[in-house]
Image: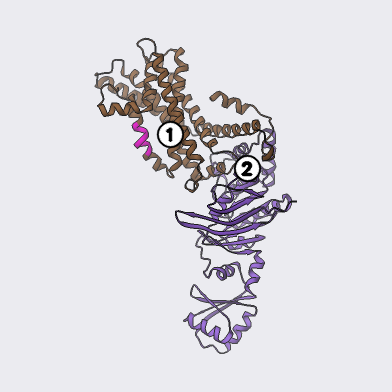
Amino acid sequence: MVESESTLTASSEKRPCDENSSHVNSTNAHSCLWLSVGSLWFREIRAFYRQRSRVVGSLATPFIFWLLLGSGFARSFRADIEAGALEFFFPGMITMVVLFTAIFSNISIIEDRREGFLLSVLAAPVPRPVLVLGKVLGATTIGLTQGVIFLIPAPFLGLAFDPAKLPAILVVIVGMMLGLTGLSFFFAWWLNSVQGFHAIMNLVLMPLWILSGAIFPTAGAAEWMQWAMKINPLSYGVRALRSLFSSTGSADYSLVLSCIAVLATFAVITLSAAFYQVSRPSARHLS
Amino acid sequence: MSNTPAVSVQSLGFSYNNNSALRDVSFEVDRSDIFGLLGPNGGGKTTLFRILSTLLPPEKGTAAVFGADVRAQPISVRRNIGVVFQGQSLDRHLTATENLEHQGHLYGLRGADLRSRIDALFDRLDLADRKNDVVDTLSGGLRQRVELAKGLLHAPKLLLLDEPSTGLDPAARLQFWEHLRTLRDHDNVTILLTTHLLEEADKCCSLGVLDRGTLVAVGTPVELKNRIGGETVSLVGENPEAIVKELSDRLGVQPQIVDGSVRFEHPQGSQLIARLMENPQEQIQSVTVSKPTLEDVFIRTTGRSFTDDESG
């Protein structure tokens, strides 16, 4: 997905497609569509790296959480966590990177609307789902890059990391990113204040993370909570990552594959919801 | 040149949660016109603007831009229109050039063609030396010109502007209007703008006066003012009702009371008043005689004063 994006921005010198709407052939119309998506994608990336505080915040926060939770739990409790606490919390922290990236990318929808940028996209001759695609692919690229950066210190902190597992790890991250960005887009589209989005973040998105198995294992939880964890798509991301980072032998690839299938379904559902939402014209998102 | 008008609006209606914002609005804008939609805030201008820019589908009636229906063919309408929104639609973290690059991509422009269009527009709008400045650092007048450049990038045939002068100082307003006139004169761009400023409406070639969702008058500013008559007379006194009665009994005019003052229009307003003042029956504190303004047009057509605390 990311590759198709970069080839898109590189390929150039095709006829501009605004000449006359009547005889635009379909290939041309497609290249226009991808030009718009690519442009919005690049805007996301650029907005991210221009905001130094965001780069530092989104990388440092999960790292600090990981070190504090991991080190704290390692001393305080020795209950069900067989492996080291740092290893136990590592997949959860990757999930947190993914979640935070999805959240912060979508806060910008509310800002774009308040500042008017969104209006000029809505008034352009491109279908509205272009907005969702630009946002989701941009956020996914950022989340993936951060996930990779997060992997670098792992071996030095005593985690089992096998480069052969990298493709599977990246696929899991992309799966979670797509689903969560779609979900946050869905919420952000309806809200007109950043405060409202923070409320959704605390009421819906953070509980998704807490109930994903990121900070406590499913096994010891209360029964209702086990059910909540079972229907939480993020649990499958955490479970797949835990298997891929396990220091006790090789990863269970059939488990990983079924987790990826769940994440893919989650992504399809949330992205369809976002597409549907954005395509419905309404006065509500104009001011 | 074809005779299809640039904009054609028929019996347009729209309401937000049962509050109707537009009621049975019909008008046409000729090609190469500068058409102003004048009205107080809340009059329905922004709703009409959003319908014409395809952001809102009309509920009742139709609206077409160069013959293309805004509901049925929004994409072809969008190719023909350049939209300059009220407030800012620029990404303030990006430079002027970067903003225009994104805009160009959305319209299918790229590469050398896009770059030369951007440079040409910046030259024309006197922005060339600021093109690599981050929008956040530009003054209101400069930003408004970048907005204009953004709306013009794909060479639209119709430019829609929502309250373009809001937030601009008088010098920047004059300069902005120079650019609009050049566009109309040299590039045959049709311009439709909304405004709540009477002095801005006076600069338009044609006007539609919009009040409470209804189009109450359409014509050139001069036509609209001539319709009123020669002179506008305004009287202030202790007892407005008694003054009205005296005026209608003795002079045969039908005045209105607006904001406590008595007003009427008459071809020879000053002569009538001279007759009245020879032998006034009622206490009159002041008399003003003036050529009609667009404000008088508004008062005459709506019976209310054009109060707007945001003007100026």
Q: Is residue B237 placed above or below A257 in the rendered structure?
A: below
Determine crowd level at label 1: few under 14, some 14-19, many 20+ residues with C-alpha closer than 10 A: many
Range covered by the magenta-colored residues:
A200-207
Give me the C-alpha separation between circle 1 and circle 2: 39 Å
Q: Quadrant of residue A22?
A: top right
Image quadrant in which you'd find residue A212 = top left
Q: For chain B, what colour was chosen?
A: purple
Residue A221 location, quadrant: top left
Locate residue A261, reporting x and y percent. 43, 22
Look at the image and give the colour of chain A: brown
* Residue identified by numbered label 1: A183
Instruction: Say which residue appears at 46% left-offset and 12% top-offset.
Output: A164
User: Which residue lies most toward the bottom here?
Assistant: B279
Task: Choose between B11 and A84: the one closer to the eye.
Answer: B11
Expressed as whole percent of the image width and height from the top left, the position of residue B32 reads 70, 54
Residue type, label 2: Arg
* Viewer-side residue, B106 vs A104: B106
Q: Chain letter of disc 1?
A: A
Q: Which residue is mark 2?
A: B130
